[in-house]
Image (tube, rainbow, N blue to C red):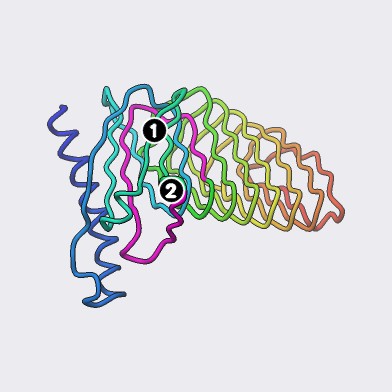
Amino acid sequence: MRIMLRAVTAAVTFAFFAAGWAVGVQAQGDRNPSPYEARREEFTGVRKIKVVGAIKVFVMSAPVETSAVTLAGPPELLADARTKVEDGVLTIGFREGADWSWNPGSGLQVVVSLPALEGIETDGPAQVEIVNAATSVPAFAAVVNGAGKITVSDIKAQNVDVAIGGSGSVQIGGTAEVVAFALGGAGSIDAKRLRAASGAISVGGPGSVFADISGAADINVGGPGTVEVVGGATCTTRAPRPSQVECR
């Protein structure tokens, strides 16, 4: 089983990096003909991930004992990349003073495999995709600070919290008993594929929230934003205009 799991992880890692490299070659021609360099690190006790900066991260849950992190990119970016684990949080970023941006085919890409994920946070224009997140956890949280993007497929949790403080976005699917969505900027939360029994939604800016709730839904809109809830929820709504909230 472990050999098969490593083979699957390796295949996903190769496919992820190869796809990014193909984009780079097409966009840059012969200016960057060298393939990515890579390094692998292992950690224990990782429950959450924080990504800081212009980094693309691919996360997959797997029945492994340790968390594996594979970083790949141009030598200069790879040399400046830093990882650390404190209080169960794996932080992925660049060294202090390094100010890298993302260019197609020339950015830092990271693949993480771990037993279970309880939370993901981005700071800056990071992009995170989480697949195979079906491992059940009591609570899961996704937080975007800035213009980041988080995509989560097939999460199973008792409680799911999503918060955005800028122009970023979160797309999430799976099942949950209770959800809490907070949007403070011009971003968007797309949770149409996250089936929830009840929830609370708060929008304080011009952003939008889409949710699937079957029971009680408490909705508070304090700005020009919009909320759309499907699933047959019983909605309690506070908004400047009734047209800003659709509940069906």
Helix, strand or loop under label 2: strand
Three-letter residue code for mark 1: Lys
Left or right: 179 with respect to 238? left
Residue 58 vertical position relative to residue 156 in the rendered view, above or below: below
Quadrant for the N terminus, please.
top left
Q: Position of residue 139 (x, y in %)?
A: 53, 26
Left or right: 242 with respect to 123? right
Which residue appears at 79% of the width and 48% of the height? 221
Name which quarter of the figure residue 215 lies in. top right
> 168 or 108: which is nearer to us?
108
Q: Position of residue 206 (x, y in %)?
A: 73, 58
| Badge 2 vs badge 1, beta-carbon distance below 8 Å | no
| Disc sitting over residue 128 in the figure | 2
Residue range highlighted in magenta: 97-122
Left or right: 21 with respect to 102? left
Measured Cα–Cα span from mark 2 to mark 1: 18 Å
| Disc sitting over residue 96 in the figure | none
Which residue appears at 54% of the width and 31% of the height? 176
Helix, strand or loop under label 1: strand
- Residue 103 belongs to the span the image colors magenta: yes
Residue sitting at the far right: 240
Left or right: 166 with respect to 223? left
Using a 10 Å C-alpha cutoff, classify the residue at mark 1 as few (fewer than 14 neighbours), some (14 to 19) or many (20 or more). few
Residue sitting at the far front: 97
Task: Find disc 1 in the rendering and name its residue.
Answer: 84
